[in-house]
Amino acid sequence: MRIDILTLFPELCRTVMGESIVGRAWEKGILDIACHNIRDYTDNKQRQVDDAPFGGGMGMVMQAQPIYDCYMTVKDMHPAPPHAIYLSPQGKPLTQQRAVELSQLPRLVLICGHYEGVDERVLEELQVEEISIGDYVLTGGELPALVLADCVCRMVPGVLAAEECFTEESHFNGLLEYPQYSRPREWKGREVPEVLLSGHHKNIEQWRREQSLLRTKQKRPDMLERVELTKKDKAFLASLEESSSLDELQ
């Protein structure tokens, strides 16, 4: 997969993407990541990329021309067709399902805004997809772009040791992940659940599924409305409801 990041802070993006698992995959050539400075595409000596908004108001707006020229140049740097994404609090929320879909594309171009945003006309011209990482505002689009890139890159084949590293995680299958444990077996009086020490893989798998259902019901019950449940899943959830009702009666 090829990822191009259009930004005012390319070194920040290179540093973050060059670390840990994603960085190692980049070194091995599994990922192809490039960071481009939008200022290099200005048409003024000051390398100014922003100006005051028409109609007045606080702050500055990134101009369309530098972003457009940067994108058009970058587009021709690689043969794979680009899918342009603008990171914006007005975009659709980033979900695990959308990240899975994006990981199957050959190339992403991530556009990082700054100040009060970017000139609307360049977004219309490039027909970008707008994605948000949450209902809050940051000082720039770099952190959201890095979040999205990390989320997508880890699902590219070869980045993680095995597909199971992400297919069993929270949100991938519509449920929250089951609790995890490591050594020592006992810590501060808390012991690892006995089933995980049994070596009985079928029982372990069932326990993990039930724990995922339980956690999702407790922490994100809204997710249960969207996930496809088996008869066994429904029976387990019904038993939880029954147990809860009995507790209330007692």
Image (spheres, rainbow, N blue to C red):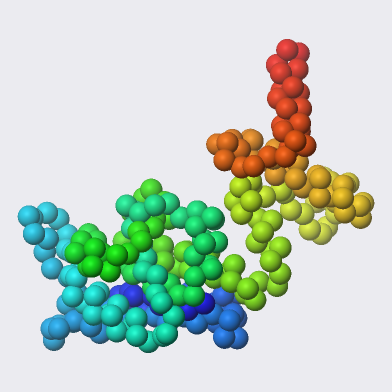
- The residue shown at (61%, 42%) is 227
**Which quadrant of the structure image shows residue 221?**
top right
Q: Is residue 117 left or right of residue 88?
A: left
Q: Position of residue 210 (x, y in %)?
A: 75, 41
Q: Quadrant of the C terminus?
A: top right
Viewer-proximal residue, 146 or 185? 146
Q: Residue furthest left?
A: 55
Q: Is residue 5 left or right of residue 199?
A: left
- The residue shown at (53%, 67%) is 103
Picture layout, residue 159 above or below residue 206: below
**In this view of the protein, can residue 167 be seen by the observer?**
yes
- The residue shown at (37%, 65%) is 85
Picture layout, residue 57 above or below residue 209: below
Q: Residue furthest top?
A: 249
Q: Is residue 2 left or right of residue 230?
A: left
Q: Position of residue 3 (x, y in %)?
A: 45, 76
**In this view of the protein, can residue 141 be seen by the observer?**
no
- The residue shown at (45%, 68%) is 146
Q: Position of residue 74 (x, y in %)?
A: 34, 82
In this rendering, the count of numbered labels is 0
Q: Is residue 112 left or right of residue 177?
A: left
Q: Position of residue 176 (x, y in %)?
A: 64, 47
